[in-house]
Amino acid sequence: MELFDAIRTRRSVRKFQERPVEDDKLEQLLEAARLAPSWANMQCWHFIVVKDATKKAAISELSYVESFFAPKGYKANPAKKALAEAPVVIIACADPEKSGVLWEQPYYMTDIGIACQNLWLAARGLGLGTVFVGVFDEARLRELFDIPSNIRVVGLFPVGYPFEEKAGGPPRKPLIEIVYQERWGG
Ligand SMILES: Cc1cc2nc3c(=O)[nH]c(=O)nc-3n(C[C@H](O)[C@H](O)[C@H](O)COP(=O)(O)O)c2cc1C
């Protein structure tokens, strides 16, 4: 798939076929993440690949954060079923010490975000689907997967073959609203 087509047609995929994901495709996703640029090339990322059904079910249960979702009227994370049903879940972690901080702005989130977008676009290019799940109980996930306390869990990616091809997604702001010429607001 041509790069811009992948960028344009990538969607959040939350429903999958039962078909397993081939290991070589899984490796290509992780390779795409590995090749991402990062602060001083420090590569703060780590990924945990989970195929075990019991563990995926546990991850799914940890995807509801009441303080975040309840005020919005959500009874579950929209990706809850996807996490339990996808053939694979990838847990994206970052080591903040392996990235930079400037003007109190930590760049590990940028680094892992770029890596995750590489993974997401690679999935699209390979005919797979996924979604960035950013809301979950980090402390309990850490316990469940023996993740050290200095490591941040940043995203969960249920990966599989999409159940259906999505025609469109939520709209984006037009360029005119987000791009300025020569100065802010110009
Ligand atoms: C950092 C981040 C966190 C997200 N967290 C969740 C989440 O917890 N649950 C979920 O269902 N979708 C989550 N999403 C998916 C977004 O809702 C989705 O990307 C957005 O609505 C645009 O839709 P699209 O991906 O189909 O273009 C997240 C996306 C990002 C980038």
Image (cartoon, grey):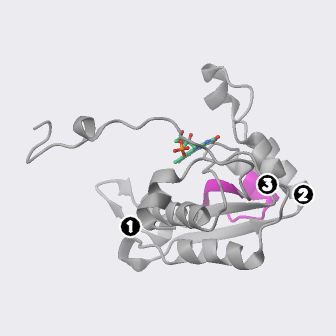
- The amino acid sitting under disc 2 is Ala
Q: CA distance from mark 1 to mark 3?
A: 34 Å
Residue under pointer 2: 53
Q: Position of residue 100 (x, y in %)?
A: 38, 67
Q: Residue at x 35, y 54 (%)?
A: 105
Q: Does the closest atom of ligand 1 sit within 8 Å of the Cβ of label 2? A: no
Earlier along the polypeptide chain: callout 2 or callout 3? Answer: 2
Q: Judge whether residue 149 can be spotted in this image.
A: no
77 left or right, relative to 29: right
Residue under pointer 1: 100
Q: Nearer the viewer, mark 2 or mark 1?
A: 2
- The amino acid sitting under disc 3 is Ala
Earlier along the polypeptide chain: callout 2 or callout 1? Answer: 2
Outermost right residue: 54
Magenta stretch containing residue 142, yes or no?
Answer: yes
Q: CA distance from mark 2 to mark 1?
A: 36 Å
Q: Which one is nearer the viewer's eye here, 122 or 116?
A: 122
Disc 2 is placed on an element classified as: helix
* Figure quadrant, ligand 1: top right
